[in-house]
């Protein structure tokens, strides 16, 4: 063999070895990336569920401690207050001799059959039923109970954790001996419905990762709380960037491939850090803002918009606000997001607000904003520079964690004195909505869409929304109803004979500033034509 031929052979062999090694390293790195993404998401889900369960146990204890006559109006009002102050609990039931006799949604006294055998029984006497259809129409959810009280967990509590690159996940609660299992949540609903849960969530499978398959999955369990999460990636998780990465290794050789793989892993993990990515997006101002209409439910007249932050990390892949806002609070970036949204609103909708002083746009605040003494001043200066009146910017408070009410109340008072309307967002699902009403002087509440779903069906008398509206009136508060999607829901709300406002896909999905201004122009043109017809 001649020297050139030997050199060519050696080069081809080295390239082949480099390609094989690069492909192997690339596969391992993809598996590590899959594990990191799934582990991070599963830990977030587990923490969220553990918080829901802690709230459920606290609510059950409070319900059992009631001194009111069972199922009396005072007792039902007491249980509704417990629902409003709990976290992702949509109903509380009262039992006698193991039979359900009333609940916050089913107020009439009943005499049903004794409850069926539970899925899980804990040592403290708590019984657990997995996600199941309930006796209330078109309703389902997990149930926890102890003594003469039980609670129904919201079936939408984990909706924010759905993401395109995660094909499915399931949350299971086990007893201390890992012999009983209750499937609390699943996405899609049928995921693991027919599987032997013991094989997945007990023994060696209790904390395991299957990464080499076409659909990688991970199972994690907490021995103290009994909460287990199984999560699977979408089969399309190997994207084109990963395949290109493997090809790049082909011509580098064994050593260069290994070094390159380690370098890629380091920078990839650093850049994939959510906090780092968020900082970069805020610096580059690549977040966007969309606007959802808020209307008068009496006649559908457009009154305001809610400004909502959106974060698109790649084309078509969005990080839900329920994911990146808590991360921003932890990383100390929440103030910057609020200021970014405010600046974008003034930039995109400033002309509209200056031309129509009755128009209002609401922006969301967090506890970081409320406890920042400089925030009211920064807000006032920004509005004055843009010639926008304070009453045109509403402020919505969404609380995910405990808040220092002394500091928050001072900030809220100053913001109201400046002329801003203050709202409690997602009323009934946050950390302590009643605590907000009792210690923060606000102007209105926004009823979460989880309560709106029961309106407009055949048995809409079981909806808790009228009770929330009555409570708000007792506090002298206005009410905004979120999540209105059908004409039947709208008509049911109009029949309450209260001056309510609302928002939802029925009146418009979140839209760009250009689309929002176009919608206003179209409505004004339509109104002008109607007025001309009346004068002729």
Image (cartoon, grey):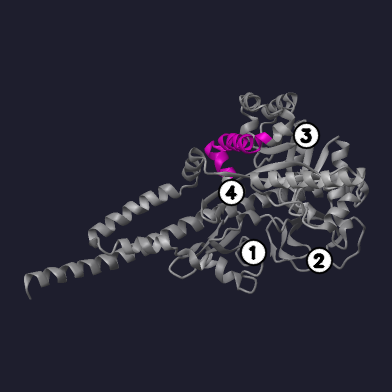
Q: Is residue 147 visible?
A: no
Q: Quadrant of the C terminus?
A: top right
- 248 within the magenta span: no
The magenta region covers: 325-351
**Circles 1 and 3: CB atoms closer than 8 Å:** no
Q: How busy is the neighbourhood of tag 3: few (under 14 within 10 Å), some, or many (20 plus)?
A: few
**Disc ID at residue 358:** 3
Q: How busy is the neighbourhood of tag 4: few (under 14 within 10 Å), some, or many (20 plus)?
A: some
Q: Measuring 92% from the left and 58% from the top, which residue is drawn there? A: 109
Which element is circle 4 on? helix
Q: Earlier in the sequence, mark 2 or mark 4?
A: 2
Which element is circle 2 on? loop
Q: Nearer the viewer, residue 99 or 82?
A: 82
Q: Earlier in the sequence, mark 4 or mark 3?
A: 4
Quarter of the rendering containing residue 532? top right
Q: How busy is the neighbourhood of tag 1: few (under 14 within 10 Å), some, or many (20 plus)?
A: many
Up-down: is 256 above or below 114?
Answer: above
In space, the residues marked 2 and 3 are separated at their CA atoms by 55 Å
Q: Nearer the viewer, residue 165 or 74?
A: 165
Q: Position of residue 192 (x, y in %)?
A: 61, 70
Q: From the image, tell me which residue sits under label 2.
A: 115
Q: From the image, tell me which residue sits under label 4.
A: 323
- Which mark lies nearer to you, 2 or 4? 4
Q: Earlier in the sequence, mark 1 or mark 3?
A: 1
């Amino acid at each position: 063999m001649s020297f050139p031929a030997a050199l060519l052979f050696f080069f081809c062999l080295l390239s082949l070895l480099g390609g094989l090694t690069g492909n192997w390293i690339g596969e391992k790195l993809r598996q590590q990336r899959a594990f990191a993404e799934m582990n991070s998401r599963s830990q977030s889900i587990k923490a969220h569920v553990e918080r829901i369960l802690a709230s459920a146990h606290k609510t059950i204890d409070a319900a059992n401690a009631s001194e009111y006559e069972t199922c009396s109006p005072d007792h039902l009002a007491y249980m509704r207050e417990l629902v409003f102050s709990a976290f992702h609990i949509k109903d509380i039931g009262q039992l006698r001799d193991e039979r359900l006799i009333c609940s916050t949604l089913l107020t009439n006294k009943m005499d049903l059959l004794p409850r069926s055998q539970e899925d899980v029984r804990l040592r403290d006497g708590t019984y657990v039923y997995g996600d199941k259809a309930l006796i209330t129409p078109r309703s389902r959810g997990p149930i926890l109970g102890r003594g003469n009280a039980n609670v129904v967990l919201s079936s939408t509590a984990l909706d924010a954790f759905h993401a395109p690159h995660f094909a499915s996940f399931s949350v299971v609660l086990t007893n201390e001996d890992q012999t009983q299992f209750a499937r609390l949540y699943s996405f899609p609903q049928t995921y693991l419905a027919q599987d032997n849960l013991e094989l997945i969530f007990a023994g060696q499978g209790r904390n395991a990762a299957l990464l080499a398959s076409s659909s990688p999955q991970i199972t994690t369990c907490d021995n103290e709380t009994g909460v287990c999460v199984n999560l699977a990636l979408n089969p399309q998780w190997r994207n084109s960037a990963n395949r290109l990465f493997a090809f790049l290794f082909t011509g580098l050789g064994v050593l260069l491939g290994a070094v390159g793989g380690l370098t890629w892993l380091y920078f990839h993990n650093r850049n994939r850090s959510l906090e780092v990515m968020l900082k970069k997006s805020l610096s580059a101002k690549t977040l966007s803002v969309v606007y959802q209409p808020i209307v008068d439910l009496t006649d559908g007249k457009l009154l305001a918009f809610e400004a909502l932050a959106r974060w698109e990390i790649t084309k078509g892949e969005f990080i839900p606000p329920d994911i990146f806002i808590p991360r921003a609070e932890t990383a100390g970036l929440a103030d910057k997001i609020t200021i970014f949204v405010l600046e974008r609103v003034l930039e995109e909708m400033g002309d509209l607000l200056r031309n129509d002083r009755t128009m209002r746009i609401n922006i969301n605040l967090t506890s970081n904003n409320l406890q920042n003494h400089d925030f009211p001043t920064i807000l006032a200066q920004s509005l004055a520079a843009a010639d926008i009146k304070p009453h045109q910017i509403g402020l919505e408070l969404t609380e995910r964690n405990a808040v220092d009410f002394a500091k928050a109340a001072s900030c809220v008072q100053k913001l109201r004195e400046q002329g801003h309307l203050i709202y409690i967002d997602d009323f009934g699902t946050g950390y302590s909505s009643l605590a907000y009403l009792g210690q923060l002087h606000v102007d209105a509440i926004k009823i979460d869409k989880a309560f709106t779903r029961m309106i407009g069906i055949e048995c809409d008398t079981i909806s808790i929304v009228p009770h929330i509206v009555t409570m708000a009136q007792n506090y002298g508060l206005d009410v905004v109803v979120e999540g209105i999607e059908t004409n039947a829901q709208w008509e049911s709300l109009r029949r309450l004979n209260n001056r309510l406002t609302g928002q939802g896909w029925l009146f418009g999905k979140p839209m760009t500033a250009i689309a929002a201004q176009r919608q206003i122009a179209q409505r004004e043109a339509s109104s002008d034509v109607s007025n001309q017809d009346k004068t002729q």
